[in-house]
Image (cartoon, rainbow, N blue to C red):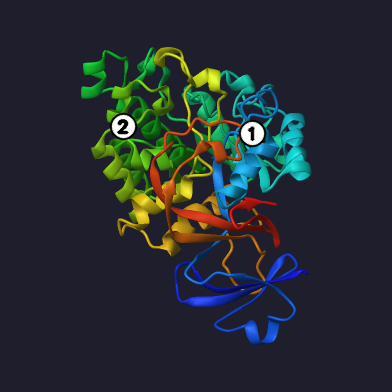
Amino acid sequence: MSKILIRGAKVLGGEPQDVLIDGAVVAAVGPDLSAEHAGSAEIVEAAGKVLLPGLVDLHTHLREPGREDSETVLTGTRAAASGGYTAVFAMANTFPVADTAGVVEQVWRLGKEHGYCDVRPVGAVTVGLEGRKLAELGAMHDSAAGVTVFSDDGKCVHDAVIMRRALEYVKAFGGVVAQHAQEPRLTEGAQMNEGVVSAELGLGGWPAVAEESVIARDVLLAEHVGSRVHICHLSTAGSVEIVRWAKSRGIDVTAEVTPHHLLLTDELVRSYNPVYKVNPPLRTERDVMALREALADGTIDIVATDHAPHPHEDKDCEWAAAAMGMVGLETALSVVQETMVDTGLLDWAGVADRMSFKPARIGRAEGHGRPVSAGEPANLTLVDTAYRGSVDPAGFASRSRNTPYEGRELPGRVTHTWLRGTATLVDGKLT
């Protein structure tokens, strides 16, 4: 049947309502649609569950082409659907780098052919992520992929002249440069957050100022040029204050925080378990609290996963040799519930804003981040917020298992995901 009746769901955490999907769109939302439609629609009982617009991740590493041992577009989008996502932005640090129209179109077409969600390629800012020469920004934007977000994520666009030129270039078509804020000279040999724990463990410290100094420079460049800049995976209390100051001046800056930076601290590095090695590094409890407050008050605009899959051999080794990164698509919503909703800092409407509406707006993902109302695309996520269980990476859809939450009890479970009315996840199982 083409019609689906979601019965008794709390839309954005509000009063229970019925939601009718007809084909690819939401046909009706109301308190009692069963009498009229129950006989002609597939029924999904949703009493007590929360219905959200499909989540949008502005920062996902799908690894294809080139590192299919870590992830592919197929496995990565299956993980996304399991986590409630209907659109993801695929970062450019693939092999070859997504710095030409040809490569971004390849990723876009793989998403069309195999994706369990929509895949929006992110184009590299510089050729080969080398920071020396601008990539084909206009050609990538004009390609079939229609790239609007550009990032050298994994590396910082550290040259101020190159960054200025990138901001000037994307301004012409309303694009945005997403900066990985890491001053390379200040982080040479860095292994973890610089502080008490790094001193005690004897590991090279990664100072907060390495992030904060780049953000300060780039918001001033964005102001000078009159362009948009987005800050990837903001991680320090000082970075929060810089972004807050920039917004108070009317600078067009947005920022994201990852779920792991909302929950985990550098104290976990005492275990020397490489699963906690990430870029930027886990910070202090003070930073974590500042990030939560900033997400609540809107200084930080969105939650982005920075889903960074790695094969077993790249993580199951000594700390210094281990790759940086964590998978996050399948646990992001649970971590946000734990840190923001269950603490009273955000309600579910706020979660929809930070994980669907705003990321879709920043990345210009048409058809996503839309209200749950009649006439809108049926990109939806149903969440059992009362569920609580331990994380078992063996059940992940992702090809990689490098999660920091293995065995940890987290709340919430996505039970259903719909992409334009087609179920990609039903009762917690991929279709």
Please give the name of the residue rendered at 53% of the width and 44% of the height, measured from the top-left corner. 330
Residue 244, given in percent of the width and then of the height, sits at: 33, 46
Real-space Cα separation, disc 2 to disc 1, in angstroms: 29 Å
The tag earlier along the polypeptide, 2 or 1, is 1
Residue 312, given in percent of the width and then of the height, sits at: 54, 22
Mark 2 or mark 1: which is in front?
2
The one nearer the camera, 392 or 372, is 392
Q: Is residue 412 above or below residue 1?
A: above
**Secondary structure type for disc 2:** loop
Q: Amino acid at mark 2?
A: Arg
Q: Is residue 203 above or below residue 157?
A: above
Please give the name of the residue rendered at 67% of the width and 33% of the height, measured from the top-left corner. 72
Mark 1 crowdedness (10 Å alpha carbons): few <14, some 14-19, many ≥20: many
**Secondary structure type for disc 1:** loop
Q: Dot 2 corresponds to which residue?
A: 283
Please give the name of the residue rendered at 34% of the width and 57% of the height, measured from the top-left corner. 342
Mark 2 crowdedness (10 Å alpha carbons): few <14, some 14-19, many ≥20: many
